[in-house]
C-alpha cells in the first residue's frame, strides 16, 4: 500500500489495510535462534516489519478497531449519522479515524460577517502497528469556518491504553458516552476563550511545544497579523505585550496543526500540548460544574 492514504465515508471492504500478522523474532548467525519473550508485527503481504513487541502485546487490527468505533457512534443516534474520515501513514502502520457529527451545531459566538461560529462534535480514534501511538479514543470538535480540529484537553473523558491485555473496549464505550453526554462542558470551555484575551503563556506556547522552525515562523506571522502587538522581543519572549482574543489565537494553532502538519503522531502531540496550555489558564469551576 502507499506510504500515506486518506478515505472519506468509504466502506471498510473498499479500504486497503495492511495484512498484519505477528511472527516470532529470531537471530541468525550460523543457525536460527528464536528470541523468547518478543514478537514482530509485520505486513504479511510485503514482509514490512512495523515493530518488535513483547509477547504480551495484544493486536487490535485497524478494521476491528473501526468497527468498534462505528458501534460506539451508533449509540448516539440522536446526533445523526457522522461523516467518517480515515488517515493511514507509514504504510498502514499508523491510523487516525475521525467521526464528525455535522447534524449537531454548537455556536461559539458570531463571526465578523454575522454568521454563527459553529463547532460540530467529533470522536477520534488513534492506533498503530508501529507502536508510535497508543490506542486512543477521544472527543473533540470541528470548527466549520476554518475546517480546524479542536482538542478539548483534559475536560472530557478519553480512553487511552497501550496494546496489552489491559485494552478494554467496554470501558472505552462508557467513557466516551459520558464525554459526549457532557459535551456542553467543551462548549463552555471554548466560549470562555471567546470571552477573554490570551495570556502571554498562550501567545508564546508555539516556542516550546514542539513546532518546527518553519511552523514557528508561520504561527508568528499569523499572530503578528491578527493581534495588536504592543511589544515583541525575540530574545526574551516574556517581555512581549500582545493583545489577541484567546479563541482566535487557538484557531491560529489548530489551523497550523490541521493543515500543515501531515504526520499523525506529531499532530496528536501538538494538539494535546496546545489544548492543555489553554486549559491550564481556565477557571476549573467553569469546566467541572
Image (tube, rainbow, N blue to C red):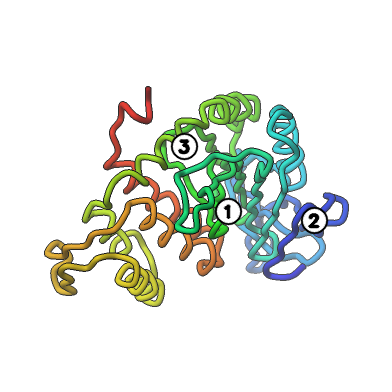
Q: Which residue is mark 2?
A: 19
Q: Which residue is mark 1?
A: 144
**Which residue is rendered at x = 75% and y = 53% of the image?**
20
- The secondary element bearing badge 3 is classed as helix
- The secondary element bearing badge 1 is classed as loop
Report if the CB atoms under discs 3 and 2 are less than 8 Å apart: no
> Residue 4: x, y in percent?
68, 67
Furthest-right residue in this view: 13
Q: Quadrant of residue 221?
A: bottom left
> Residue 263: x, y in percent?
55, 64
Q: Quadrant of residue 153?
A: top left
Report if the CB atoms under discs 1 and 2 are less than 8 Å apart: no
The span from disc 1 to disc 2 (Cα, nearest Å) is 36 Å
**Which residue is rendered at x = 23% and y = 54% of the image?**
201
Rendered view: 224 above or below 257: below
Furthest-front residue in this view: 114
Which numbered disc flags the more N-terminal residue, 1 or 2?
2
On the picture, is 264 further left or further right than 154? right
- The secondary element bearing badge 2 is classed as loop
> Residue 242: x, y in percent?
21, 62
Q: Nearer the viewer, residue 196 or 258?
A: 196
Rendered view: 50 above or below 116: below
> Residue 84: x, y in percent?
72, 49
Which numbered disc flags the more N-terminal residue, 3 or 2?
2
Disc 3 residue crowd, few under 14, some 14–19, many 20+, Cα 10 Å: some
**Which residue is rendered at x = 82% and y = 63% of the image?**
45
Label annotation for residue 187: 3
**Which residue is rendered at x = 54% and y = 47% of the image?**
118
Rendered view: 121 above or below 112: above
Amino acid at each position: 500500500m502507499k506510504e500515506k492514504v486518506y478515505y472519506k465515508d468509504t466502506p471498510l471492504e473498499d479500504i486497503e489495510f495492511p495484512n498484519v500478522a505477528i511472527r516470532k523474532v529470531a537471530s541468525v548467525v550460523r543457525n536460527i535462534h528464536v528470541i523468547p519473550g518478543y514478537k514482530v508485527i509485520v505486513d504479511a503481504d510485503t514482509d514490512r516489519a512495523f515493530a518488535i513487541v513483547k509477547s504480551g502485546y495484544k493486536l487490535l487490527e485497524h478494521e476491528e478497531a473501526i468497527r468498534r468505533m462505528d458501534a460506539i457512534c451508533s449509540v448516539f443516534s440522536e446526533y445523526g449519522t457522522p461523516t467518517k474520515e480515515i488517515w493511514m501513514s507509514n504504510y498502514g502502520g499508523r491510523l487516525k479515524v475521525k467521526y464528525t457529527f455535522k447534524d449537531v451545531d454548537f455556536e461559539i459566538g458570531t463571526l465578523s460577517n454575522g454568521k454563527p461560529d459553529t463547532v460540530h462534535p467529533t470522536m477520534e480514534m488513534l492506533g498503530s502497528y508501529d507502536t508510535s501511538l497508543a490506542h486512543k479514543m477521544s472527543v473533540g470538535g470541528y470548527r466549520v469556518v476554518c475546517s480546524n480540529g479542536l482538542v478539548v484537553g483534559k475536560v472530557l473523558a478519553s480512553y487511552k491504553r497501550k496494546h496489552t491485555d489491559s485494552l478494554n473496549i467496554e470501558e472505552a464505550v462508557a467513557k466516551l458516552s459520558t464525554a459526549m453526554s457532557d459535551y456542553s462542558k467543551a462548549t463552555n470551555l471554548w466560549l470562555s476563550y471567546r470571552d477573554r484575551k490570551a495570556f502571554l503563556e498562550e501567545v508564546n506556547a508555539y516556542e516550546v511545544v514542539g513546532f518546527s522552525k518553519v511552523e514557528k515562523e508561520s504561527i508568528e506571522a499569523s499572530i503578528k497579523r491578527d493581534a495588536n502587538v504592543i511589544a515583541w522581543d525575540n530574545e526574551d519572549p516574556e517581555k512581549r505585550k500582545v493583545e489577541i482574543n484567546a479563541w482566535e489565537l487557538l484557531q491560529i494553532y489548530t489551523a497550523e496543526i490541521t493543515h500543515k502538519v501531515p504526520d499523525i503522531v506529531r499532530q496528536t502531540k501538538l494538539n494535546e500540548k496546545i489544548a492543555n496550555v489553554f486549559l491550564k489558564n481556565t477557571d476549573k469551576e467553569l469546566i467541572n460544574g
